[in-house]
Image (cartoon, helix red, strand yellow):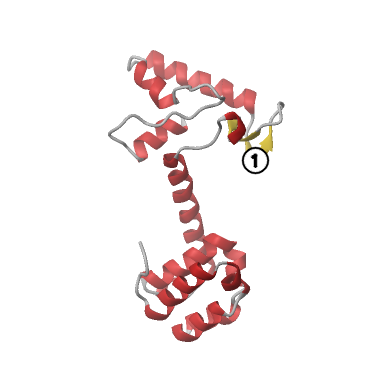
Amino acid sequence: MLSQLLSKLFPTPSRPKSVTKSSESLPSSASVQAQLPESSNSQNLLTKATKQIKRHEGFVSHGYKDSLGFLTVGYGRLIDKSKGGGISEVEAEYLLANDVNHVYDSLMHNLSCFTTLDAPRQAVLLNMAFQMGIHGLLQFKNTLRLIEVGNYDGAADNMLQSLWAEQTPNRAQEMATQMRTGVWQSG
């Protein structure tokens, strides 16, 4: 089902990469669906089988070890590299888009000054909140106060004097420059 959704959101001209549940190469559900005739029978099969799989596997929102000790997530999705598990880049893009949208919504609800900023400066706060969470960003009280009054140079200086800047100096330098200038530094 996820593969079907992803193929609709991110259509690709070439055949989608297969995602494996084991060291064997299994076709993704999108590939399986493409091989089945387009009919209500095949759609009914996929819907019912998916419902059964969800019931049997159960949903876990974090990584866990399955009954054989392999790292798994979601509805039994093997992500243990040692057994050929993982996610495709398309799936990672889908997850990233969800995460970025969630962080954006959090910023809209938690920072009154967010909507007053230009896009490059909003992106700095989005980037920081993505990396350290909204609660981590909210700890930058002086920086946020400076942003609120339009003192972007002071905010950038504050950003560079933080533990965050020590831990991720290249990212912090780029984001501080973008905050200072209001000019996109990449992307």
Residue 132 vs residue 144, the one in the foreground: 132
| Closer to the camera in the image, 130 or 44 | 130
51 vs 187, left or right, is right
Q: Which residue is mark 1?
A: 63
Q: Give left or right: position of 160 versus 14.
A: right
> In percent of the image, x 54 and y 77: which residue is there?
159
Q: Secondary structure at mark 1?
A: strand
Q: Quadrant of residue 69?
A: top right
In the foreground, 182 or 176: 176
User: Where is 106 relative to 61, above or below?
Assistant: below
Q: Where is residue 14 shown, x and y percent of the image?
A: 30, 32
Q: Is residue 62 left or right of residue 6?
A: right
**Number of marks:** 1
Please name the residue shown 49% across and 67% down the image: 171
Residue at the left extreme, as displayed: 13
Q: Position of residue 7 (x, y in %)?
A: 37, 34
User: In which quadrant is the C terminus drawn?
Assistant: bottom left
Above or below residue 20? Residue 93 is below
Q: Tell me which residue sits at (43%, 46%) in the image.
A: 93
The picture places residue 67, in percent across and down from the top left corner, at 72, 27
Residue 62 appears in the rendering: yes
